[in-house]
Image (cartoon, rainbow, N blue to C red):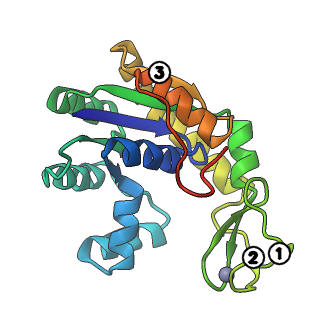
Amino acid sequence: MRKYVIMGVQGSGKGTQSALLAGDLDLVHISVGDIFRWHVKNHTKLGAQVRRLVAAGELVGDDLVEDVVSDRLHLHDWNYGFIIDGFPRNRRQAEFFLESYDIDGVIHLDLPDEEVRRRVLARRLCSRCGMDYNLIAHRPSTEGRCDVCGGELVTRTDDTPDALARRLRDYHTKIDPVLELFRRKEYVMTVDARAGKTTVQQAIRASLGLPPHTPSRPGETA
Ligand SMILES: [Zn+2]
């Protein structure tokens, strides 16, 4: 049984790296963001609550996040363990989590704010089918057009420099103390997230004492 927490700013590749690790080790990938998106998409009561908060320009509160994570973990479908992303969000949650779940390690994907800005501001979204693009890592073959449906590529409304600067500030204010607490208890493995995705994954494996990842699926190279 392996239990990991993964931390890193938006754009640091948490989702990708968690999926690679979870796939090989049969871990359940618990992404708080994905859970909330699922509720919004499926029009649940919780989804309506989240939608109201977002419409009012507010963030989902720590207590709500805690409830969602706790419900998810109580499903106990994680026979081989889990990797959790988006939690804990404050020191109290971090302390409680350490006491309750006997964590094996905290993977910290380290990405300088400058690189976050470069990556996030390069994101584009198809206005027709919703396919994600990135002008650095995943360029469309025709500029400004979706490869799949030919729709126009647009920037997400919350991917402006100002909005991103605000999110980065919020992230550091909130998450740096959590990271510091984990660091003091010697759980944190910091991995340089600037490299390509396979390189980052291998660095994670090495730091956790796991065998290297063998790319197997098509397209899954550096
Ligand atoms: Zn499209």
Between tags 1 and 3, which lies in front? 3
Residue type at tag 2: Leu
Q: Which residue is drawn at 44% across and 30% down?
A: 107
Residue type at tag 1: Gly
Q: Is 91 left, or right, of 215 in this rendering?
A: left
- The residue where tag 3 is placed is 207
Total numbered circles: 3
Q: Is 182 left, or right, of 12 in this rendering?
A: left
Find the residue positioned furthest to the right. 143
> Does residue 85 appear anywhere in the picture?
no
- The residue where tag 2 is placed is 153
Q: Residue at x 19, y 49 (%)?
A: 73
| The CB of the residue at mark 3 lies under 8 Å from ligand 1 | no
Residue 88 higher or lower than 130, as above or below: above
Q: Residue 35: x, y in percent? A: 34, 62
Between tags 3 and 2, which lies in front? 3
* N-term-proximal mark, 3 vs 2: 2
> Does residue 202 appear anywhere in the picture?
yes
Q: Residue 135: x, y in percent? A: 79, 59
Q: Residue at x 45, y 67 (%)?
A: 54
- What is the CA distance from the residue labelled 3 to the residue labelled 2? 38 Å
Residue type at tag 3: Ser
Label disc, if present, on residue 144 of the rendered structure: 1
Q: Is 207 left, or right, of 62 in this rendering?
A: right
The answer to which image quadrant residue 192 occupies is: top right
